[in-house]
Amino acid sequence: MAIKKFMYTNRKAPYGTVYALESLEVVLIGAAFDQDVSLAFIGDGVYQLTKGQTTEAIGQKNFSPVYAALGDYDVNKIYIEKESLEERGLSLDDLQHLVWEDEDEDWAEKDSIRLVSRSELADVMTEQEIILSF
Amino acid sequence: MPIEVNGKSFETDEEGYLANLSEWEPAIGEAMAAAEDQDLTDEHWDIINFLRDYYEEYQIAPAVRVLTKAVGKRLGKDKGNSKYLYELFPYGPGKQACKYAGLPKPTGCV
Amino acid sequence: MGLLHTVNKSPFESNTFDTCLGYALDGSTVLLIEDGVYAATIGTRASEKIQQKIQSNNDVSFAVLGPDLQARGLENKLADGIKVVDYEGFVNLVAEHDSVQSWL
């Protein structure tokens, strides 16, 4: 199978709607197909990655730990839109620090998160072959 | 159908996966394996314990590809291949080992 | 007492929160729930509007549902002047007000 460039765009906050969880499940299942995968977090989508989510009291599964496993699935291009983060009073420190391990460099840990401006992300989006929107 | 272990009864789903993850104890894994004529050696337990640790940290059962890579890293390259894992768990490392570990069936697992 | 207004939409996704503010009269309380809790976090336009409302009319109160704030990992981002309530507090607010307007 030819490798294609996939981008998943995530624009919804977690828990209030089911989009965030659905996207995550599609990403994990899709990872079995060895494609070139990028994730973009835009608008309220940046809220999916906040640290310290605690969901016992709302009776929903806390799926935020799953994002930390994405590196194991070779999903290691995680784009965060800078403008969206700033508009929400957040910085990268408020988000999980996502990493992946490079098997070819003796499992060296590398950052997965790329903080980019809207115009930079627009360029990355334009390079994609398949875009899935959540 | 529930599974009986040490006089206690534990709920499972229609494929035999434990319904409630928090009820798991090693004896349940042993009983599930015995029902499938599968001996559990230390090598099997390395994998089962790895799966439980992984689930604890990330809240998902890893796909076989992820499991293979992680086993290679933790237990050595000679074990980080599907041949080694399928020899231990002939019904499929994801499916069978996750069941004994009390985890749900892995996402994207065939 | 006036109305209890509940808002369950993110202020970035819909104008529900802005509309609600326009309807919050004396004696009313605005309770932010579900994705509405994002309006209660510091550094956002929405929380600035809450501060302005509090300054211009101290007879309108603001509250946020704690469990929804915790779920979203934003407990330490709560803006000033907004009371945190649990589910029991939610019920009390319903009982204290004449009626409830659930903005959707």
Image: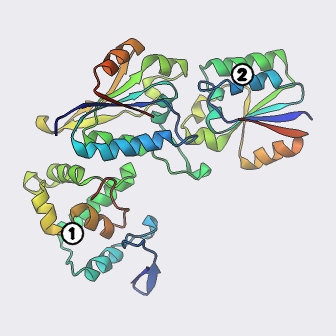
Against A27, is B37 above or below?
below
Q: Residue at x 29, y 53 (%)?
A: B62
Is the same chain shared between marks 1 and 2?
Answer: no
The amino acid on which the numbered mark 1 sits, given as a three-letter code, is: Tyr
The residue pinned by badge 1 equals B91
The chain containing the residue under callout 1 comes to B
Q: Closest to the observer: A5 or B39?
A: A5
Please provide percent x and percent y for residue A25.
Answer: 39, 46
Q: Closest to the observer: C17 or C84?
A: C17
Q: Residue at x 36, y 67 (%)?
A: B102
Image quarter of residue C23: top right
Image quarter of residue A126: top left
Please provide percent x and percent y for residue A62.
Answer: 49, 47
- Horizontally, is B55 left or right of C61 in the view? left
The chain containing the residue under callout 2 comes to C
Q: Closest to the observer: B72 or A46?
A: A46
Image quarter of residue A7: top left
Q: Quadrant of the N terminus of chain B?
A: bottom left
Whether residue A64 is visible, yes or no, is no
Q: Residue furthest bottom?
A: B7
- Horizontally, is C43 left or right of A97 in the view? right
- Horizontally, is B90 left or right of C75 in the view? left
Residue C5, disc: none
Please provide percent x and percent y for residue A131.
Answer: 35, 29
Q: Residue at x 71, y 45 (%)?
A: C86
The residue pinned by badge 2 equals C18
Q: Secondary structure at mark 1?
A: loop
